[in-house]
Image: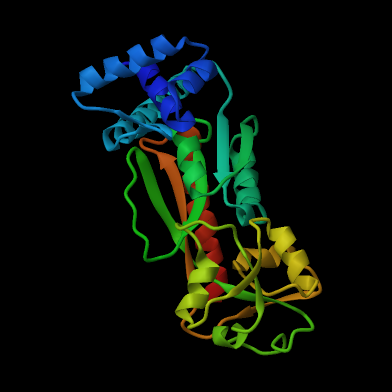
Amino acid sequence: MNLRFVETLREVGERGSFSAAATALHFTQPAVSRQVAQLEREVGMPLVVRSRQGVSLTAAGRLVVEHAEVIRGQLLQLETSLTELSGGSRLAVGIGGFPSAFIGMIPELVHGLRERVPEAEITLKRCGHDEALSLLRGAEIDFALVFARPELAQRLAGIEIVEMGEEPMLAMLPRTHRLALESRVNLPDLANEAWIVGAPDPTSSIIVNACLAAGFDPNVVFETDDPLATQSLVAAGLGVSLSSPWASAALREDLVLKPLAPPVPIRRVRALVVDPPGPGARILLELARELELGQLEESAN
């Protein structure tokens, strides 16, 4: 199967028409049609469906694109690894992660990587769960930290999932809040509050699901994945929120983080790498395990 033709198929699916894909790829529309038709002959089933709304991928088309992205990413990773093995270049590592990971976890990983490989070239990318998968498969990053609810189990083609641990969520309140002096906060006691939550994501919508499990539908007044924006809005009295323990590393003085009474909502932190991981990803996995272990031991004490 020609990977260049698969790239054409992906563009058709994303842009919704043969002509838009042709423009993006600098091809003629007949050339795009021929490449898709050739793929359909090789696969033996339709890969696109045409309608008045445009062109979309069939289930087979989506499957072809997904697996081809995995293969392409592995080939690029192989090329990078071989170059590094031959000593032809410095170690180049791309790290992705959810926004709050850049408060504590990712800076710690970067510090550890710099100590082991001082000449490493490091690039960083803020990304959610699904974007991290796309970046990994496209060999744009080597390692990603994502989070999800503990009950969500996943198997991802061409991706190794490494469980890094579970983090108990904490209530983030203004220091002047009526519950700020409590040793623990019952989540139902916040049912009438306004809420600041993360951007919608079915894989990792921790706060909304925690509120629903506690018996109330939160009054969401703002959505943001920026942890500093969340702190500023909570401090201004716009609402309350839930946060990871990592937020304590950069918590405003006018805010408090309070443990929640059982049942405590948990988020599961995962590291994602391509399978098999390259040299940089292997180092980062080792560092991440050491970092998470240290955090767990500190919490236990």
In this picture the colour scheme is: rainbow
Q: Residue at x 51, y 55 (%)?
A: 290
Q: Based on the displayed image, in which of its 4 quarters is residue 150 positioned?
A: bottom left
Q: Residue at x 65, y 45 (%)?
A: 111
Picture coordinates of residue 126 (x, y %)? 61, 45
Left/right placement of residue 46 relative to residue 33 reads left
Q: Based on the displayed image, in which of its 4 quarters is residue 172 positioned?
A: bottom right
Residue 251 in sight from this viewpoint: no
Number of on-image labels: 0
Residue 117 in sight from this viewpoint: yes
In the depicted view, which residue is nearer to us: 169 or 299?
Answer: 169
Left/right placement of residue 103 relative to residue 93 reads right
Give the farthest residue toward the front.
Answer: 52
Picture coordinates of residue 104 (x, y %)? 65, 56
Picture coordinates of residue 169 (x, y %)? 55, 72
Q: Vertically, is 79 above or below 252?
A: above
Q: Vertically, is 223 above or below 87?
A: below
Q: Residue at x 46, y 32 (%)?
A: 14
In the depicted view, which residue is nearer to us: 207 or 260?
Answer: 207
Instruction: Quarter of the image for the N terminus: give it.
Output: top left
Q: Residue at x 57, y 70 (%)?
A: 298
Q: Vertically, is 121 above or below 131?
A: above
In the depicted view, which residue is nearer to us: 257 or 235?
Answer: 235
Picture coordinates of residue 113 (x, y %)? 59, 41
In the depicted view, which residue is nearer to us: 131 or 298?
Answer: 131
Instruction: Quarter of the image for the C terminus: give it.
Output: bottom right
Q: Vertically, is 210 above or below 71?
A: below
